[in-house]
């Protein structure tokens, strides 16, 4: 594959990949994945996030031809784990931002999916941590990577309250077409995952139909959000990896009737632009 791909959302640092991370990174590069973002979600994971990042940079130096994707860091405190977050963790996040070359803060946002996350207390606490991290993003001039489940209206409201203009990515977008257009208007790209490979993902298809190729980025969210074709594959059914990103591109190209190479080039440029990186 000649086109370069950017996996804008991975959890490639988690222990699922400890046994064969380098081999999987090399496989991803061979599939055209030349860059990926390592996402933070818990303060206790920051050390592993940094270690994986450094390992990947070391592997790159060992292979002058670039045999593994270029890694980028995005630490954050995920709303799903709101009960584990402490106020001190916000200070730790800021210190991480100061000590490491980070392209974004994420993943952050609001999650009302589970019953325990829908209580008044949980919603208030999630909003407090989300707001505090938006303040950090403004202070350090970083885009944010948004995690949103059943909370798109509240996320938009808080972004507007903060007059947030740094943009970023609405990760694994699950909202409707009008919500997608609202995020795009605020400077965000729409993150498209392996869900697009499912013919029944009608809501996501509607989002694509009401936005433009300039508005999208693609991601694996590995080890989650496995493309449908990989779920049905005996060899890959148990795990999603960055090497599966081409399946997301292929499905998006088929739906939009855009030539795969042209779409890949647009998505690459979108990724660089929204994360403010040059390659």
Image: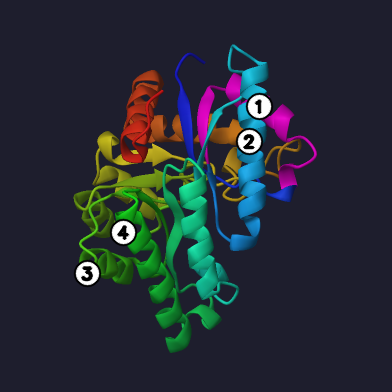
- For the residues labelled 1 and 2, the Cα–Cα distance comes to 6 Å
State how far apart marks 1 and 3 are (Cα). 42 Å
Neighbour class for label 4 at 10 Å: few (<14), some, many (≥20)? some
Viewer-proximal residue among 196 and 110:
110
Above or below for 224 versus 67: below
Q: Are marks 1 and 2 in contact (CB under 8 Å)?
A: yes
**Residue 254, horizontal then vertical, whole percent:** 40, 31
Queried whether the magenta region covers residue 26, the answer comes back as yes
Residue 75 makes an appearance in the image: no
Q: Which residue does the numbered mark 1 point to in the structure image?
A: 58
Residue assigned mark 3? 161
Of badges 1 and 4, nearer the viewer stands 1
* 117 in the magenta segment: no
Find the residue positioned furthest to the right.
Answer: 19
- From the image, tell me which residue sits under label 2: 54
x, y percent for residue 219: 48, 41
Image x and y of residue 8, in percent: 46, 40
Q: How far apart in space, not on screen, are marks 4 and 2 (Cα)?
A: 38 Å
Q: Where is residue 214, by image quadrant? A: top left
How far separated are the C-alphas under marks 3 and 2?
A: 37 Å
Pointer 4 residue: 176
Q: CA distance from mark 1 to mark 4?
A: 41 Å
Tell me if mark 1 has few (under 14), some (14-19) or many (20+) residues whose alpha carbon lies within 10 angstroms of its own: few
Looking at the image, is mark 4 or mark 3 earlier in the sequence?
3
Residues shaded magenta: 16-37
Which mark is in front, 4 or 2?
2
Residue 275 vs residue 17, the one in the foreground: 275
Q: Are marks 3 and 2 in contact (CB under 8 Å)?
A: no
Indicate the quadrant where residue 84 lies.
bottom right
Under circle 4, the secondary element is loop
Q: Are marks 1 and 4 in contact (CB under 8 Å)?
A: no
Q: Residue furthest bottom?
A: 120
């Amino acid at each position: 594959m000649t086109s370069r791909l950017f996996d804008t959302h991975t959890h490639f640092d988690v222990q699922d990949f400890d046994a064969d991370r380098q081999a999987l990174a090399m496989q991803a590069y061979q599939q055209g994945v030349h860059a990926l973002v390592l996402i933070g979600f818990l303060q206790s994971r920051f050390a592993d996030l940094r270690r994986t990042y450094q390992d990947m940079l070391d592997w790159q130096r060992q292979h002058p031809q670039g045999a593994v994707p270029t890694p980028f860091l995005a630490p954050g405190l995920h709303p799903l784990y709101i009960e584990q977050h402490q106020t001190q963790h916000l200070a730790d996040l800021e210190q991480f931002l100061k000590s490491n070359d980070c392209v974004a803060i994420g993943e952050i946002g609001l999650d009302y999916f589970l019953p325990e996350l829908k209580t008044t207390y949980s919603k208030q606490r999630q909003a407090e941590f989300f707001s505090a991290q938006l303040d950090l993003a403004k202070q350090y001039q970083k885009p944010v990577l948004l995690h949103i489940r059943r909370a798109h209206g509240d996320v938009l409201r808080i972004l507007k309250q903060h007059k947030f203009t740094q943009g970023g990515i609405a990760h694994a977008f699950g909202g409707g077409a009008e919500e997608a257009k609202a995020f795009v208007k605020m400077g965000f790209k729409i993150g498209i995952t392996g869900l697009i490979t499912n013919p029944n993902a009608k809501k996501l298809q509607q989002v694509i139909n009401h936005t433009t190729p300039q508005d999208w980025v693609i991601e694996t969210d590995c080890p989650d959000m496995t493309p449908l074709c990989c779920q049905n594959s005996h060899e890959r059914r148990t795990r999603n990896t960055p090497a599966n990103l081409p399946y997301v591109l292929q499905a998006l190209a088929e739906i939009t009737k855009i030539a795969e190479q042209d779409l890949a080039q647009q998505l690459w440029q979108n990724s660089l632009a929204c994360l403010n990186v040059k390659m």
